[in-house]
Amino acid sequence: MSVTDHRAPHTVPGISVAVIGTGSIGQDLVSKIRRSPVLDCALVAGRDPESAGLRRAAGLGCPTSADGIGAILAAPRPFDVVFDATNARAHAEHRRLLRSFDTLLIDLTPSKIGQMVVPTVTGVHAPPEGDVSLISCGGQASVPVAHALAERFDVRYFEVVSTVASSVAGRATRLNLDEYVATTQQALTAFTGVGDTKAILNISPAVPPATFRTTVHALAPGADPGTVRAVVDEAAARVREFAPGYRVRGCEVRGELIVVTLEVRADSEVLPAYAGNLDIIDAAAVLVAEQHAVRLAPAARQGVSR
C-alpha cells in the first residue's frame, strides 16, 4: 500500500475512519468528517493519483492512497468505520473483502445490501460491525415524510420523484440508475408497509442548476389537509436536526392525493448549494458514524451534540 500521510499535527485522533471514493460525495464526506469532534479521517482512498479528491484530502491533512480498496485491506489494523462512496457494483466486492474485518461499512451507494438506515425513522444504531445501507439520496429525503404519512393515514400508494442537477450526477450515479430505483422503492415499502410504490430520478441539465428536490405523492382517502401539513412539518423538523438545508416547499391535498415537495440545499464547504442530494446522504452517514463512535468510546459522548 502506498499511503502519503498529510495529517495535520494538531489533529486529535478519535475513532479511525476511511473513505473509499474521491468524487463529489467523497470530498464532502471528508469535509464533514474533519468537522466532527469524534471521527479521525485516517485514510482517503481512490484509484487516480491525480484526482482532485485526493489532492483536496491531502490538503486537509488526511492520509491518502491511490490503491483503492487495496489500501483499506493493507492497513496495519482495521478501521473502525469505512465509508463506501463508489458505486453499487464495487460495493458488493468491497463488502465481500471486508466481511472478516472488525469494521462498520457504511454504504452510500444504492447497492441494496446491508441494514437500511434512515436516521429519523430507524435511529442510527448500526450493528457494531457489518454493512449499513443509506439507500439513496432520494430515499433519505422521502422516507421520513412517507413513513410519517403512512403512520397517520391509510396510504394506498406512494410515488417519489427526485430531481438532481446534471453537474452533480457523476458517473457512479448514472451507472446506478436501475439500482437507485429498485433500492429506493424497496425502502419505501419497508418503512411504510405500502406495497405499491414507485421511484423516479430525473437528471436535470438546467442552467442555472436545479436545486435538489423530491416530491412525494401519496394516495390516502380521507386525509385532512391540516393534519397532513402538521405531520409533514414535524417529520421535516426532525430531519433538519442533522441536515439543516431540508425544507418543505409545498404540501397539498387534492381529494385523495397528497403532494409534498421537499427541497434540500447543501450545508457544505465543498458542494454547491444546489447539491442537497449529496449533502443529505453524507450528513446521515456521518451521524451514523458519530453514534458508532459513542458506543465504541463512551468518553467521546461529551463531544457529540446530536
Image (cartoon, helix red, strand yellow):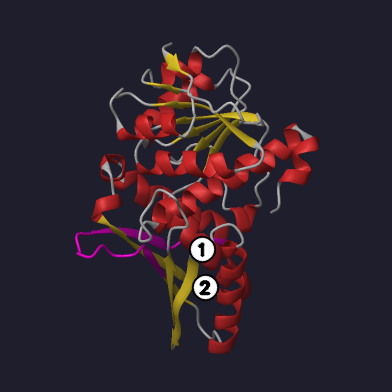
Q: Amino acid at mark 1?
A: Val
Label 1 crowd (10 A; few <14 / some 14-19 / many >=20) = some
Can you name the residue that lies furthest to the front here?
9
3D distance between C-alphas at marks 1 and 2: 7 Å
Q: Indicate the quadrant containing the C terminus: top left, top right, bottom left or bottom right.
A: bottom right
Q: Is mark 1 in CB contact (under 8 Å) with mark 2? A: yes
Label 2, secondary structure: give it: loop
The foreground one among 77 and 176 is 77
- Rendered view: 253 above or below 261: below
Q: Is residue 208 one of those drawn in magenta?
A: yes
Q: Amino acid at mark 2?
A: Val
- Rendered view: 172 above or below 219: above
Label 1, secondary structure: give it: loop
- Seen at 57% across and 53% down, the residue is 118
Label 2 crowd (10 A; few <14 / some 14-19 / many >=20) = many
Q: Tell me the magenta residue range.
A: 192-215
Q: Position of residue 24 (x, y in %)?
A: 36, 43
Image mark for residue 155: 2
The picture quadrant where one finds residue 1 is: top left
Q: Is there any visible trace of residue 256 in the rendered image?
A: no
- Seen at 28% across and 58% down, the residue is 165
Q: Position of residue 106 (x, y in %)?
A: 53, 36
- Seen at 45% across and 73% down, the residue is 218
Q: Which residue is mark 1?
A: 194
